[in-house]
Amino acid sequence: MNYLSDRINQLAESETLAMTRRSRELRAKGIDVINLSIGEPDFNTPEHVKTAAKIAIDQNYTHYPPVPGYPELRQAIANKLKRDNQLVYTPEQIVVSTGAKQSLANIILSLVNPGEEVLIPAPYWVSYKEIIKLAEAKGVFIEGKIDYNFKVSAEQLEAAITPNTKLFLFSSPCNPTGTVYNREELKTFADVFERHPQVFIISDEIYEHINFRGKHESIAQFESIRDRVIIVNGLSKGFAMTGWRLGYMAAPLEIAKACDKLQSQITSGACSITQRAAITAMDTDPSNSPDIRNMVEAFHYRRDLALALLKEIPGLRVNVPDGAFYLFPEVVRYYGKSYGERVIHSATDLCDYLLDTAFVAIVPGVAFGSLDCVRISYATSEDQLREAIRRIAEALAKLA
C-alpha cells in the first residue's frame, strides 16, 4: 500500500546529494573515494565572519528573529546590491531565507499557478525542475549546446514563450556549466521580455563572486524589466558558508511580501546567529577581500589545471567555463564501450562505472537536463584533483 502523497512520489532525489551519499557509504567501508560531485567550496568561512557569530551568541541573539530577516541584515543586503551591482532596493524588498534554495521555492510557490509554464535554459541546477513540480507548474526547457558554451539565444527564448509562460528561471554564473552571460547577451534577453510583460524573471546569482571574466552582470540592471526581476543570492559559495544556510532575494515589494507570508507558515526566520554573521559578510567589499580574492584565484587555477588534464583524455569534449567551479564534459563517445560484462549505455552508466572502479564520484548530466554530459566539481585540492583525473583517465582507457 502506497500511503505517501503523489507530490512526494513524483519528486526526484537530488542526484548530487545521492552521489555524495554513495561516496560516504563507500568511505565508511574504508574505500578511498574522491568526491567531485558536491558543489561546496573547500575553503573555510572567513575569520571575521566567524567572529561576528561568536559575538552574536555572547550577545544572546538566540531568540526568534523577524521572518524576513533582521532589519540590519536587510539593510546590509540593500547596501551590498548598491555597492556591488549598482541596484537600488529598500530593505522591505529583501527577504532572508534558510539558503538560496528556500528563496527559490518561496518565489516559485508565490508566483506560479498549477499548469503555468516556467522557462529554464538547460543545463540547469538540479532543484529547479523539482521545485516547479511542487508548484504543479510545467517546466519548459530551452537547450543550450556545448558548441555555444551552453548558452541559449534570445531567438530561442522568444520562440519558447507562450501566452501561458509565467516565469523565466536561470543562473549566471551557471551550475552545472560555469556559463556566464555578459551584458550584451542579457540585454537581448531583456529586449525579449519587454515584448512579453506577463513573464517574470528569477536571476539566480549565487555564484556571483566566482567569476573569471571580471565584473558580474545582473539582468536586473535593465530598467524596462526591473519590476519583474527577482534576484536570488546567498552566502554559501562566495563566502564558503554552505553549512550556515543563508540565502536572500531582492524583489518587487508585492512579491517580497508574498514570500514573507509563505515563509512565516513554513520555517519563520533563518537562524539568528547566521543572520548576525551575515551582516558582517554583506558589509565586506569583495573587491577588497583577500578571502574572496584568494578563493577565486584558486578556483581559476584549478579550472585551468582540470581542463588541461581532461583534454588529454581521448573521447571527452570540454568547453571552457567562465565561472562557478564545475566542468561539464560531453561523454557520448564512450557509449557502447565496455569493460568485462559492463557496457556503457549512458552518462549515468559512466558515472556508476567510475565510482565503482576508479572510486571517483561525479554527477550524470541527466540530473541537469543534459543526457550526454557529466558534472565534475573542482572544488577540491590540487592533489586530489590530479589524482581523481588520473583515476578517471585510467578507468576510461580500460573501456573498449
Image (tube, rainbow, N blue to C red):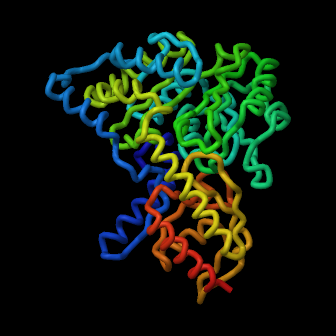
**Side (left or right) of 112 relative to 45:** right
- How many labels were placed on the picture? 0
Residue 285 in percent (x, y) is at 45, 28
Depth check: 124 or 395 in front?
395
Depth check: 242 or 7 in front?
242
Residue 269 in percent (x, y) is at 33, 23
Residue 335: quadrant of the picture:
bottom right
Q: Residue at x 59, y 53 (%)?
A: 367
Residue 283 in percent (x, y) is at 40, 24
Q: Residue at x 45, y 40 (%)?
A: 292
- Quadrant location, the C terminus: bottom right
**Side (left or right) of 349 relative to 119:** left
Q: Is residue 56 above or below residue 290?
A: above
Residue 123 in percent (x, y) is at 66, 48
Depth check: 148 or 256 in front?
148
Q: Residue at x 50, y 42 (%)?
A: 6
Q: Is residue 90 visible?
A: yes
Q: Is residue 267 visible?
A: no
**Side (left or right) of 75 relative to 229:** left
**Side (left or right) of 77 relative to 227:** left
Residue 247: quadrant of the picture:
top left
Q: Is residue 144 above or below residue 163?
A: below
Depth check: 338 or 192 in front?
192
Residue 333: quadrant of the picture:
bottom right
Q: Is residue 371 above or below residue 338?
A: above
Q: Residue at x 79, y 49 (%)?
A: 148
